[in-house]
Image (cartoon, coloured by chain):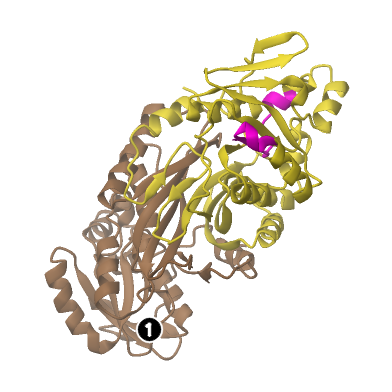
Chain colours: A yellow, B brown
Amino acid sequence: MNEFELIHRLTRALPGNESLVTGAGDDCAVIDLGLPDRLVLFKADAVVEGIHFTPEAPPEKIGHKALARCLSDIAAMGGVPNSALVTLALPRHFDSGRIETIYAGMSALARRYEVAIAGGETVLNPERLLISVALLGTVARDRCILRAGARAGDAIFVTGELGGSLAGRHLEFEPRVAEGRWLAEHFSIHAMIDLSDGLAGDLRHLLKAGHVGAELLASAIPISRSARVASKAETSAKPPLLAALTDGEDFELLFTVASRDAVPLLDAWKKQFPKLKLSCIGKVTAGEGVTIRDKQGVRPLTAHGYVHFS
Amino acid sequence: MNEFELIHRLTRALPGNESLVTGAGDDCAVIDLGLPDRLVLFKADAVVEGIHFTPEAPPEKIGHKALARCLSDIAAMGGVPNSALVTLALPRHFDSGRIETIYAGMSALARRYEVAIAGGETVLNPERLLISVALLGTVARDRCILRAGARAGDAIFVTGELGGSLAGRHLEFEPRVAEGRWLAEHFSIHAMIDLSDGLAGDLRHLLKAGHVGAELLASAIPISRSARVASKAETSAKPPLLAALTDGEDFELLFTVASRDAVPLLDAWKKQFPKLKLSCIGKVTAGEGVTIRDKQGVRPLTAHGYVHFS
């Protein structure tokens, strides 16, 4: 049983309550605590030594990544992050200076987004360091963007450039909090997700939630420089387009809007975020399944997202 | 450097923000999200295989414990739990049936307290299972009970019976959510903490937060049956009183009230919770330090709480 199958089994019949708006299956849980104009966003995630970072990774970047992953999920709902709790699972022998530097990296990012680090716990995890972060945020009641909601005919957008994140960007990416919030406030975004498993996999999650399909344009997929460099340097590396489609940990935003909003959105984006690329990579289709169009024609996109436990 | 020293260093200068009411150092973080009459409580904790439970522990009890620990912290603020997120850090080879049963144990407890399990993540932690739980709750704005607030002359109370929890109670304890909420609603509780490190250690945390001391009455400390049984069965076991003072994982509530409220509280408690013992175990003193009175007189209490990383 792989990760996705297990999650499916575990989340079939979870307890809910009156205040739960959206539970397992979206980027964040959405909770109605009775705030007049806002909903509460709730997210938890963890990074593990040897899995999400190597023992040699600069400690401040480990801390940055641990918090940035959760911030990215808040961004994907159009939300504003508020407070984080940090659970440190420490190996039996740890370097306290390294842990302090991890905390410094996390704190620097938290300060930039006015996120309070509101506490946490330490436990023993004898073999390796694990950092679990829980994050609380809020979103305007009528501006919360779910994964579900994509409609046939929608334009599909992605921020930034994709692929090759493991060469370094995965440790220092900037979560798209300002961008997600701006999108939610200024446009009718139908569906949004942040890219953690890779474009092909996360697009499928978004499309599945909306019971729709998509046609992508190969030439429109924004390919990162590191994906291009890797494909030239190593003969075993993926071709750049495949890397952009299937590499994980991009932490960019993928979203859909009505096609009539596509051009106004691109124009407004260029003024608001002149340094960050925004690409229209295709359109939502009524039938399920994903196809990709290139010079040779239209083919089914069979590339799968990275499965953590494969 | 032990756990407490590291936590002290890490929490010296954490980022805050406008909405943070109480950060690191209490049972839960307290956050003001702008609800007219309530504050938000936020807690995260983790249990680790081989540390907080053995591989042989019944899986439903592992799930119960993972959530119950966080519920106990909400209880210690006088709060009402609302929603939980569960991060499963799974070893490379795991028994999916066991994981499902762990979830079933957690879900059963969640349903009893109307807590939604709002989602979570799975990650790989190759050597052992770790379960991290984040919990959101709320508390009436004027009824949130902190660790700080004990005053000289206060009566000190503890719920239940202490010591010997590792014989089994640590896996199946009932978090004192109803009791904590009732106390907050009906009495002016000056300070409260839940017992996780052991009475002697947690009492020190509570007293330190209030810059006060305490005098305990040895004969008033409620000693659990399992602590008495253990001390008879094994010659190396702690004497029962020492076990009640220093064993961890009792998850009972320790709190102080003005001495004039002590008798009315005991009377009302007996009617409200006839099956759960409530003991007045001593009084808060103006000077710092803890003493214990028994037949031989008054002696300083030197027994320390259990230090996780000693």
Is residue A254 rendered magenta in the image?
A: yes
**Residue B247 on image: x %, y %:** 36, 62
Task: Tell me if residue A163 can be seen.
Answer: yes
Residue B287 vertical position relative to residue A160 in the rendered view, above or below: below
Q: Quadrant of the C terminus of chain A?
A: top right
| Circle 1 residues within 10 Å: few <14, some 14–19, many ≥20 | many
Identified at 39% across, 28% down, the residue is A9
Task: Tell me if residue B58 can be seen.
Answer: no
Residue A70 vertical position relative to residue B94 in the rendered view, above or below: below
Identified at 20% across, 79% down, the residue is B265
Amino acid type, callout 1: Ala
Give left or right: position of B162 versus B29: left
Secondary-structure class at tag 1:
strand
Give left or right: position of B210 versus B167: right
Residue B40 in which image quadrant: bottom left
**Residue B146 on image: x %, y %:** 41, 74
Is residue A114 rendered magenta in the image?
A: no
Identified at 27% across, 73% down, the residue is B185
What's the chain of the residue with tag 1? B
Residue A294 in which image quadrant: top right
Residue farthest along the top direction in this orientation? A296
Q: Which of the two residues, A200 or B241, is positioned nearer the viewer here?
A: A200
Residue farthest along the front direction in this orientation? A260
Residue B68 vertical position relative to residue A222 in the rendered view, above or below: below
**Residue B75 on image: x %, y %:** 34, 64
**Residue A184 on image: x %, y %:** 59, 48
Residue A51 vertical position relative to residue B155 in the rendered view, above or below: above
Residue A85 in which image quadrant: bottom right
Q: Which residue is mark 1?
A: B214
**Span colored in magenta:** A243-262
Q: Which of the two residues, A248 or A185, is positioned nearer the viewer here?
A: A185
Give left or right: position of B56 versus A306: left
